[in-house]
């Protein structure tokens, strides 16, 4: 069974904790690489605008820090790839890791 979970984890320690919950080799960190400017432009809920107005404190990309992953198993440039292209790359990656057929 393959389970995909999206975590808002701006800190390396949080990602290390998530990785430690699974057996070695079963956790795959996929880094969705995108600039804060593009995140803000894509924000359907207006959270970036709310954070800029001071309504949300510690918001990643505004006044909250972010530690880029040091060695994710996969990096997707979501600024330049479509959702479909990202899905294709993930699905191509899984069999190579013997996680799917």
Image (cartoon, rainbow, N blue to C red):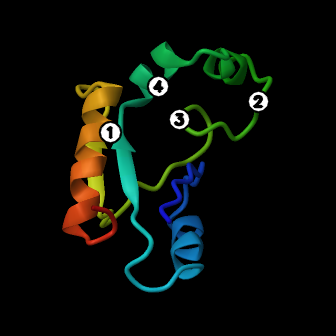
Q: Which residue is mark 3?
A: 61
Q: Is residue 27 above or below residue 92?
A: below
Q: Which residue is mark 4?
A: 39
How many numbered circles are shown?
4
The answer to whether residue 76 is seen in the rendering is yes
Q: Is residue 8 left or right of residue 90?
A: right
* Of marks 2 and 4, the one in the foreground: 4
Separation of residues labelled 4 and 3 (CA atoms): 9 Å
The answer to whether residue 77 is seen in the rendering is no
Out of 71 and 49, give the one closest to the viewer: 71
Q: Is residue 18 above or below residue 36?
A: below
Question: Element at badge 4?
Answer: helix
* Of marks 1 and 4, the one in the foreground: 1
Q: Residues within 10 Å of mark 1 (few under 14, many from 20)?
A: few
Separation of residues labelled 1 and 4 (CA atoms): 19 Å
Separation of residues labelled 1 and 3 (CA atoms): 25 Å
Q: Earlier in the sequence, mark 2 or mark 4?
A: 4
Please tell me which residue is depicted at 37% across the width and 54% down the height of the picture: 30
Q: Are marks 4 and 3 in contact (CB under 8 Å)?
A: yes
Q: Which residue is mark 2?
A: 56
Out of 76 and 96, give the one closest to the viewer: 96
Q: Earlier in the sequence, mark 2 or mark 1?
A: 2
Q: Residues within 10 Å of mark 3 (few under 14, many from 20)?
A: some
Checking the image for residue 87, the label placed there is: 1
Q: Earlier in the sequence, mark 1 or mark 4?
A: 4
Report x, y in % for residue 60: 58, 39
* Of marks 1 and 3, the one in the foreground: 1
């Amino acid at each position: 069974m393959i389970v995909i979970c999206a975590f808002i984890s701006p800190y390396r320690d949080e990602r290390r904790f998530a990785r430690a919950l699974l057996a070695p080799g079963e956790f795959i960190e996929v880094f969705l690489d995108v600039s804060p400017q593009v995140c803000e432009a894509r924000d359907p809920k207006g959270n970036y605008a709310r954070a800029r107005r001071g309504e949300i404190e510690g918001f990643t990309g505004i006044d909250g820090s972010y530690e880029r992953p040091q060695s994710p198993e996969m990096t997707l440039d979501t600024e330049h790839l479509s959702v479909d292209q990202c899905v294709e790359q993930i699905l191509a990656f899984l069999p190579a890791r013997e996680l799917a057929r």
